[in-house]
Amino acid sequence: MPVMHKGTLLGFDFGEQRIGVALGEPELGIATPLATISSDSNEVRFAAIGKLIEEWQPTGFVVGLPTHMDGNAHALTALCRKFAQRLHGRYRLPVWLVDERLTSVIAESLLEEAGVRGRKQKPVLDQVAAQAIVMAWFEEPGELLG
């Protein structure tokens, strides 16, 4: 049974070019795709994240942690951990790391079911993957930083 968290969460599907963002409401068990931040500049990324934080006033963050299918870390795993640490350091809110294996597959499936196919998926795929990450957190909160 997951830890009950009060308040809104922002969920992140971290990538080097894009970060998908979703909104999570733990008390309701609902997650919604919110935004895709497209930039390789940390300054631009955190400015966009800051605006979302100001607007939604989250009480915590959920970050999908990428690993190989066997659970072993790869290059993006370390970058994602660094991103999660920066979130925690800048905003002083709890950050949970959640296994994100297969969330992109789940996101593609959800979009297919909604009739969004091919090139139309690209602009929203990362935020729907972030939604799947938050939904995974509802089931198993994962590793809490700080």
Image: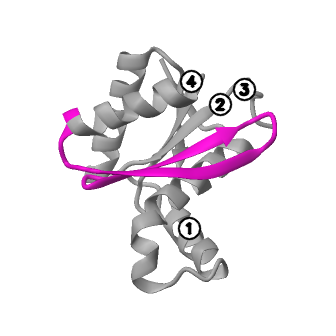
Q: Earlier in the sequence, mark 1 or mark 4?
A: 4
**Image spot of residue 4 (x, y percent):** 77, 28
Location of mark 3 (residue): 5
Of marks 4 and 2, the one in the foreground? 4
Q: Mark 3–mark 1 contact, CB under 8 Å?
A: no
Q: Amino acid at mark 4?
A: Gln
> Marks 1 and 2, how far apart in space?
21 Å
> Marks 1 and 4, how far apart in space?
25 Å
> Marks 3 and 1, how far apart in space?
24 Å
Q: Earlier in the sequence, mark 3 or mark 4?
A: 3
**Image spot of residue 119 (x, y percent):** 39, 81
Location of mark 2 (residue): 8
Q: Amino acid at mark 3?
A: His
Relative vertical location of residue 95 with respect to residue 73 in this rendering, above or below: above
Q: Which mark is residue 83?
A: none
> Marks 3 and 2, how far apart in space?
9 Å
Question: Dot 3 lies on which element?
Answer: loop
- Mark 1 closeness class: few <14, some 14–19, many ≥20 residues within 10 Å: many
- Mark 4 closeness class: few <14, some 14–19, many ≥20 residues within 10 Å: some
The segment highlighted magenta reads 15-43
Question: Dot 4 lies on which element?
Answer: loop
Horizontal relation, residue 52 to residue 5: left or right: left
Of marks 3 and 2, the one in the foreground? 2
Q: Which mark is residue 57?
A: 4
The residue closer to the viewer here, 34 or 145, is 34
Location of mark 1 (residue): 107
Q: Mark 4–mark 2 contact, CB under 8 Å?
A: yes
Q: Mark 1–mark 4 contact, CB under 8 Å?
A: no
Q: Quadrant of residue 2?
A: top right
Question: Dot 1 lies on which element?
Answer: helix
- Mark 2 closeness class: few <14, some 14–19, many ≥20 residues within 10 Å: some
Residue drawn at point x = 23 percent, y = 38 percent: 44
